[in-house]
Image (cartoon, grey):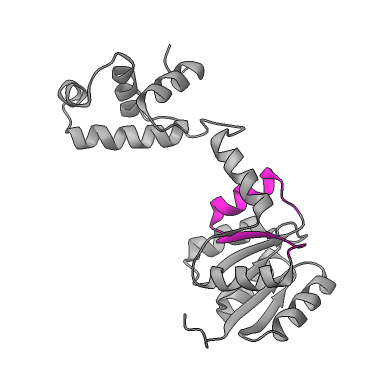
Amino acid sequence: MSDDALISLLIVDDHPVVRDGLRGMFESAPGFTVLGEASNGVEALERAAALDPDVILMDLRMPGGGGVDAIKELTRRGARAKVLVLTTYDTDSDTLPAIEAGATGYLLKDAPRDELFTAVRAAAEGRTVLSPAVASRLVSAVRSPNTPGNEPLSTREREVLALVAKGTSNREIARELFISEATVKTHLTHLYTKLGVNDRAAAVATAYERGILG
């Protein structure tokens, strides 16, 4: 996006005062244009389809349709707009679902206006934007998830893990399971992600801890 291109916005919030404030702020700043507003997630989907904005400023908790569901649906539809969550809340229960649903960034409503302008420009370019408070929470949540192992391991991933626990090398695992070494590595990558670990030792330890390996 070139510097002289206007970044078009859709503002989604259930409070008219907040929408008015944001509209006034962006319309008085060079480089932005506000195409429209919506008061809930359902309306946001209709307006986004009609207006095709560059960036959607999305509140999360709104009567008549929340932000996370709207973000999921925008992602499913392959919408061009980048979603920047702008909310009062920075709790894990809000942050993670919004990011997982496809939000490009997450800012709190008390962010200084310059930070907000910078964030919208970054979001328009597809860069991830997280307020410092949210970023630290997100990192903590990813490092020590509250509800790990939601995604079960496949039968083949369990077989690979059981052999890893016996100290079997990738080459030997490939031979024993009649698959290629590259496939073994793929299974390992997937099960590392599901277990939230980075190496074989941690995968085995976590699997015993969770009762996946008996």
User: Residue 120's spot in the image, x, y percent?
Assistant: 61, 71
User: Residue 124's spot in the image, x, y percent?
Assistant: 53, 73
Question: Residue at 65% across / 73% down in the picture?
Answer: 117
> In this view of the protein, which residue sits in the foreground, 29 or 20?
29
Position of 131 compared to 155: left or right? right
Position of 183 compared to 208: left or right? left
Question: Residue at 58% across / 43% down in the picture?
Answer: 139
Question: Residue at 59% across / 60% down in the picture?
Answer: 105
Position of 48 compared to 79: left or right? right
> In this view of the protein, which residue sits in the foreground, 49 or 97?
97
In the image, residue 155 lies in the stretch drawn in magenta: no
**Furthest residue toward right:** 17
Quarter occupied by residue 53: bottom right
User: Residue 188's spot in the image, x, y percent?
Assistant: 32, 32
Position of 177 compared to 162: left or right? left
Q: How many marks?
A: 0
174 to 127, vertically: above or below: above
113 to 24, vertically: above or below: above
> In this view of the protein, which residue sits in the foreground, 151 or 187?
187
Q: Quadrant of the C terminus?
A: top left
User: Residue 87's spot in the image, x, y percent?
Assistant: 73, 59
Quarter occupied by residue 43: bottom right
Residues rendered magenta in the picture: 89-111
94 to 143, vertically: above or below: below
Question: Residue at 55% across / 79% down in the picture?
Answer: 52
120 to 5, vertically: above or below: above
